[in-house]
Image: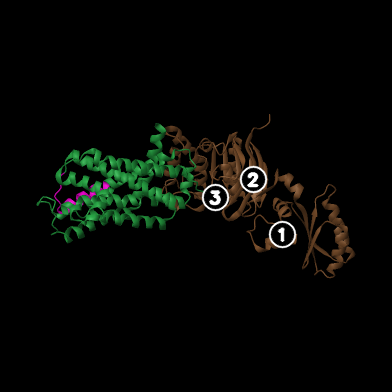
C-alpha cells in the first residue's frame, strides 16, 4: 500500500511541477474559455432558450457548458506529455522501473484531472465575474465535480492511450482536432437539445459531454442532483474502461 | 570457489524490420563480478545485445537466463536487479536533478530515510552537489551524464548495463567514471559496457566481447584477444624517398612471407603476425640489415603497440573507432 501511494504521489508531483513550469499553456487554458464566454455569451445574448425558465439568460446557460468544455479540451491534451517523454527517452526509463504501470498512469491522470477541476472552478468564477447567475450549493456542486472528474479521467485516459499508440505530436494533434470540435458541437454545451435538428438531438443524447453539461447545469442553474444511475454511472463505466486501456497499453509498451 | 553464472544466452537471434540482422546465434555466459566490455564497429549489434540482456528487446530465437531466471518470463523481477543506462541521456529537462533523484527513488520503492541517504550518497559519489538544484536543461553534457548514471544506480542494481557511457565526458569525467566502475564491481556487482574507447576497455574490463555483423567473434580477456589476433606493426622511416620499391619489397616479402608490407613516401609499414618465435629485436635487426644492403639510411623505427583496435581490424577488416565509411568497406574487400 505504501509503495502504491509512493508511486502515485511521485508521478502526481512531477506532473504538477511540469504544469506549473509551463505557465503559458496554463494561462492559455484559462484565456480560451474566457473568450468563448465573451464571444458566445454576448453574441447569443438575445437567444431565446425555449425550454428554460425565463429568468435564465444565455450566459447562465453557457457557463456550465464552457466549464465542461474546458475539461474536455484540457483532457484531450493529456497525452502530449507522454509523447514528450517518449521522444526524450524518459518514458523508456520509467517503464524500465519495477513500479506498476497502472499506478504511473493513475498518478499522471489524477494530477491532470485535479488541474482540470481547478481550471473548471476558475472558469465558473470567471463566468460569475462576467455576470452569470449561478447557484452554489454544496451537494449538487460536489455531484457536478465528481461528474467532471469522471469525464476528465475518461478523456485523459483516451488521450494517453492515443499518445501511446500514435507516438507523435502530429498524430496527437489530429486526434485532438478530430475529437474536440465534433464532440463540442454535437453536445448540449452551446444549445439545448430541443433547439437542435432532430438528428443532432439524437446524437447529443449519446454524447458523453452532454451528460456532463447536463449534470453541471442541473447543479449550477437549479441546485439539483440528478439520479446517480443515469448521471454518474455511464461516466464511471467509461472512465474505468478507458483508464484500463491506457494503463494496459503503457504496461505492454516496448519503448527502446 | 567458482563464480556463479549471471547471464546465459543460448542461440540468440534478432532481426529488425526490413530483414536487418542484428544478432546471429549468440551464445554467451557471463559470471558475476565481471566488468565486460562489448566492442564493435557501428551497427555491429553491440547495443542490441545489451538491450536483449536488459530485456527491453524481444528475440526471435534462443533463450536467455539472467540471474538464473528466464529473462522473457521474469521481466518485472529482473527490473529490480538490472539497470540499463541508455546512450541517450533520458532526463526531463524541466526538472531539477534533485527532483529527478526523488522521482526515481519513489519508482524503485525507496522512501523516507533510506531514499534520502541513497540520494545523498549518489550526490556525493557523482559530485552533483553544485548543480543538483538546477533544472536539467541548464546542465552541461558531462553534468547531465553524471546525473543520468546516478539515476541508473539509484536502486543499487546487481547488474549494470551501460551503452556508451563516456561519450559526453571530458578526460576528468572519464577517469572518474572508470574509478566508479571499478569500485562498483568491488562492491560485488557486475557491469557490462558498450564502448568505442578501447584503451580503458583493455585496462579495466575483465573480459571483452568483440562483435561483428551480429556475430560474437571473440570472447576473452583483452590481453588474450590482442595476443591471438593483433599483429605487430613496425614503421620504418628513411631519410630519403624510397626508390626501387619493388626490389626492397620483394626482398622483405621473402624474409617475412606472411607479412603485410606497404610503402608510402619515406615510410614502410610492416605488419607481422605474432607467432611463438616472434621477436621484435630480431625482426628489427633483419630489416635494418636489409636496408643497409640497399644503402638506405633509416631516420626512425617505431613499433606500434598491439591493440584491440588492431585485433578487431584483423578479424573483421573494420576499424572500431572510425564511423562506418566507404573506405572501411574497401579495406575489407581488399583483404
Would you say the residues marked 3 and 2 are in contact, meaning their CB atoms lie under 8 Å apart?
no
Does label 1 or label 3 sit earlier along the sequence? 3
Instruction: Give the labeled residue for mark 1.
Output: B332
Q: Quadrant of the C terminus of chain B?
A: bottom right
State the image coordinates of residue A125 (x, y, percent, origin top left): 20, 49
Name which residue lies at 39% across and 48% down.
A160
Helix, strand or loop for disc 1: helix
Numbered label attached to residue B146: none
Name which residue lies at 80% across and 50% down.
B274
Numbered label attached to residue B37: 2
Chain A display color: green
Quadrant in the rendering for residue A38: bottom left
Please say whether residue B249 is one of the residues in the magenta stretch: no
Does label 3 or label 2 sit earlier along the sequence? 2
Chain (brown) = B
The residue stretch that appears in magenta = A118-135
Amino acid at each position: 500500500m505504501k509503495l502504491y501511494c509512493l508511486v502515485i504521489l511521485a508521478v502526481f508531483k512531477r506532473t504538477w511541477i511540469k504544469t506549473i513550469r509551463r505557465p503559458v499553456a496554463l494561462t492559455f487554458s484559462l484565456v480560451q474559455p474566457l473568450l468563448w464566454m465573451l464571444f458566445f455569451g454576448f453574441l447569443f445574448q438575445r437567444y431565446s432558450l425555449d425550454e428554460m425558465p425565463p429568468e435564465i439568460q444565455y450566459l447562465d446557460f453557457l457557463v456550465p457548458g464552457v466549464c465542461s468544455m474546458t475539461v474536455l479540451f484540457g483532457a484531450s491534451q493529456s497525452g502530449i506529455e507522454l509523447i514528450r517523454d517518449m521522444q526524450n527517452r524518459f518514458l523508456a526509463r520509467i517503464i524500465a522501473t519495477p513500479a506498476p504501470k497502472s499506478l504511473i498512469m493513475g498518478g499522471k491522470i489524477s494530477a491532470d484531472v485535479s488541474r482540470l477541476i481547478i481550471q473548471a472552478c476558475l472558469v465558473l468564477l470567471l463566468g460569475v465575474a462576467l455576470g452569470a447567475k449561478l447557484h452554489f450549493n454544496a451537494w449538487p456542486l460536489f455531484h457536478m465535480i465528481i461528474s467532471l472528474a469522471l469525464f476528465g479521467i475518461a478523456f485523459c485516459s483516451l488521450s494517453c492511450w492515443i499518445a501511446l499508440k500514435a507516438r507523435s505530436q502530429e498524430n496527437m494533434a489530429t486526434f485532438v482536432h478530430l475529437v474536440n470540435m465534433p464532440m463540442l458541437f454535437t453536445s448540449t454545451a452551446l444549445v439545448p437539445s430541443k433547439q437542435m435538428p432532430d438528428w443532432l438531438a439524437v446524437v447529443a443524447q449519446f454524447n458523453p459531454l452532454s451528460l456532463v453539461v447536463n449534470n453541471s447545469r442541473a447543479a449550477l442553474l437549479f441546485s439539483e442532483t440528478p439520479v446517480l444511475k443515469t448521471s454518474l454511472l455511464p461516466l464511471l463505466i467509461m472512465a474505468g474502461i478507458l483508464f484500463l486501456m491506457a494503463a494496459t497499453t503503457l504496461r505492454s509498451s516496448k519503448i527502446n | 570457489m567458482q563464480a556463479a553464472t549471471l547471464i546465459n544466452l543460448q542461440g540468440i537471434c534478432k532481426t529488425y524490420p526490413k530483414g536487418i540482422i542484428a544478432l546471429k546465434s549468440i551464445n554467451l555466459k557471463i559470471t558475476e563480478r565481471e566488468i565486460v566490455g562489448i566492442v564493435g564497429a557501428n551497427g555491429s549489434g553491440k547495443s542490441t545485445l545489451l538491450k536483449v540482456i536488459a530485456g527491453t528487446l524481444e528475440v526471435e530465437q534462443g533463450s536467455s537466463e539472467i540471474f538464473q531466471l528466464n529473462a522473457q518470463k521474469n521481466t518485472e523481477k529482473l527490473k529490480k536487479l538490472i539497470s540499463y543506462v541508455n546512450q541517450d541521456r533520458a532526463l526531463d529537462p524541466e526538472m531539477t536533478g534533485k527532483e529527478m533523484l526523488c522521482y526515481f527513488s519513489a519508482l524503485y520503492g525507496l522512501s523516507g530515510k533510506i531514499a534520502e541517504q541513497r540520494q545523498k550518497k549518489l550526490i556525493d559519489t557523482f559530485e552533483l552537489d553544485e548543480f543538483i538544484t538546477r533544472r536539467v536543461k541548464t546542465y552541461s553534457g558531462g553534468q547531465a551524464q553524471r546525473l543520468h548514471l546516478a539515476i541508473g544506480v539509484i536502486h543499487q542494481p546487481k547488474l549494470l548495463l551501460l551503452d556508451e557511457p563516456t561519450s559526453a565526458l571530458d578526460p576528468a569525467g572519464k577517469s572518474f567514471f572508470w574509478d566508479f566502475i571499478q569500485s562498483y564491481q568491488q562492491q560485488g556487482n557486475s557491469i557490462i559496457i558498450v564502448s568505442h574507447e578501447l584503451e580503458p576497455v583493455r585496462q579495466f574490463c575483465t573480459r571483452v566481447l568483440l562483435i561483428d555483423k551480429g556475430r560474437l567473434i571473440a570472447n576473452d580477456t583483452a590481453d588474450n584477444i590482442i595476443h591471438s589476433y593483433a599483429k605487430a606493426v613496425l614503421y620504418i622511416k628513411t631519410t630519403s624517398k624510397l626508390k626501387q620499391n619493388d626490389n626492397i619489397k620483394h626482398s622483405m616479402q621473402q624474409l617475412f612471407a606472411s607479412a603485410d608490407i606497404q610503402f608510402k613516401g619515406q615510410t614502410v609499414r610492416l605488419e607481422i603476425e605474432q607467432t611463438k618465435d616472434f621477436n621484435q629485436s630480431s625482426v628489427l635487426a633483419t630489416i635494418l640489415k636489409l636496408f643497409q644492403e640497399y644503402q638506405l639510411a633509416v631516420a626512425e623505427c617505431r613499433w606500434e603497440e598491439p591493440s584491440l583496435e588492431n585485433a578487431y581490424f584483423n578479424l573483421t577488416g573494420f576499424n572500431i573507432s572510425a564511423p562506418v565509411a566507404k573506405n572501411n568497406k574497401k579495406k575489407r574487400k581488399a583483404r
